Amino acid sequence: MDRTHKVPQSLAINSDYKRSLLGGLELFEGVAAEDVQDLLQRCGRRDLAADEILLSPGEKNEFVYIVLSGSVNVHVSSPDAPVLVTMDVGACVGEMSIIGDRDPSAYVIGAEPTHLLSIHQTVLWEMINASHTFAKNLLVILSERVQNHNRAVAESFGELRKFERHARTDALTGLGNRHTMEESFLREMKRCQNDALPVSLVMIDIDNFKRFNDMFGHMAGDRALSAVAELIRTQFRPRDLIVRFGGDEFAVLLPEVAEQKALEIADRAREAVCGKTGDGSDSLIKIPIRISMGVAQAVEDSTLSNLIRAADAALYRAKNAGRDRVSS
């Protein structure tokens, strides 16, 4: 059923009412009533029920709607999405699709029973030609819409980046996680292989961590994991890639480092964790934590999976040899 009809004749005849009405509408603010009087006669009125869809993506729109009473909600992506903004009396909707000659980019839905002034696109262009003030108002509204759109995009992008960062970061230690490992480790491995440079992997496991958790509790276990992660971080170069491999295991990729040098670096890190370096006063750990480490160097055409298996095998050799040591 067509719910659009002519604006009541009193809107055109009663100049005082007309001026008061136009003064409350953002598109007509400051517009001389006589400049648009005849054009207003060609506008219509749309009655919108609560939850009724006025505009939607994929459906062509030919009208600019101005809220005379009530309000409408704007939703992005779907009618069930959270309300992006509520447009109250005086606000207009639909102008972006008219000016851009494209389908609406959002859903506009009645927030309550609402009455709207509907301006067909042909009348809109005539109003622009008839009144400089009307044209300026429309330009201001379009500018605000673009700014709001850009702000929404920036906020969405920020949320996306935050989500991606969380997806790539271990929440407890702040280190990269397995997802980071699969991307950054592989990229560095390929670079070193292409440049004929060595690259080594260190796998690290906290000794008897289950027993530690049983003795001191999981909260102490989490603190120990965080402390180990921080100590490990201080023992490697900024360019080395460190991730929490899972549970109480960590992995460190050392670009341009051969196995023998990697063994020396790993042993220094092991001593730092167990407090054997210096007098131990600067150690972050005041509890009996020890680690075992396995080191492997990538060979020609090694895949990341092969390198992980080789370093993991070296780690188990360290554990089988008594733990608290580094093996290759």
Image: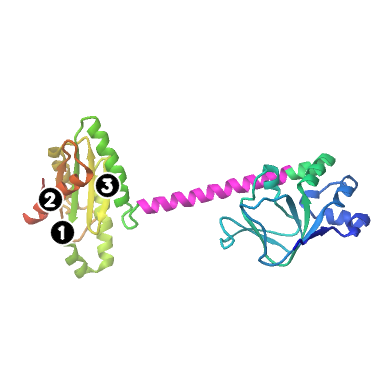
Q: Amino acid at mark 3?
A: Ile
Residue where numbered disc 3 is placed: 242
Q: Nearer the viewer, mark 2 or mark 3?
A: 2
Classed neighbour count for the residue bearing mark 2: other residues with Cα under 10 Å, few (<14), some (14–19), many (≥20) = some
Residue 310 percent location from the top left of the image: 14, 47
Q: Is residue 248 in view from this perspective?
A: yes
Residue 30 percent location from the top left of the image: 83, 47
Please identify the dominant SS of the magenta region.
helix
In the rendered structure, which segment of residues is drawn in magenta? 139-168
- Along the line of sight, which residue is nearer the eye, 233 or 162? 162
Question: Which residue is at the far left?
Answer: 321
Q: Amino acid at mark 2?
A: Ala
On residue 292, the disc is none
Total labels: the figure holds: 3
Q: Is residue 17 above or below residue 314?
A: below
User: Cα distance, mark 2 to mark 3?
Assistant: 19 Å
Residue 128 percent location from the top left of the image: 80, 42
Badge 3 element:
strand
Q: Is residue 265 above or below residue 204?
A: above
- Along the line of sight, which residue is nearer the eye, 239 or 31? 31
Residue where numbered disc 2 is placed: 313
Q: Is residue 276 in view from this perspective?
A: no
Residue 97 located within the stretch drawn in magenta: no
Q: Residue at x 19, y 61 (%)?
A: 287
Badge 1 element:
loop
Q: Residue at x 21, y 42 (%)?
A: 303
Residue 149 located within the stretch drawn in magenta: yes
Q: Reading the chain from its start, which is encountered first: label 2 or label 3?
A: 3
Residue where numbered disc 1 is placed: 207
Picture quarter with the N terminus = bottom right
Q: Residue at x 81, y 49 (%)?
A: 28
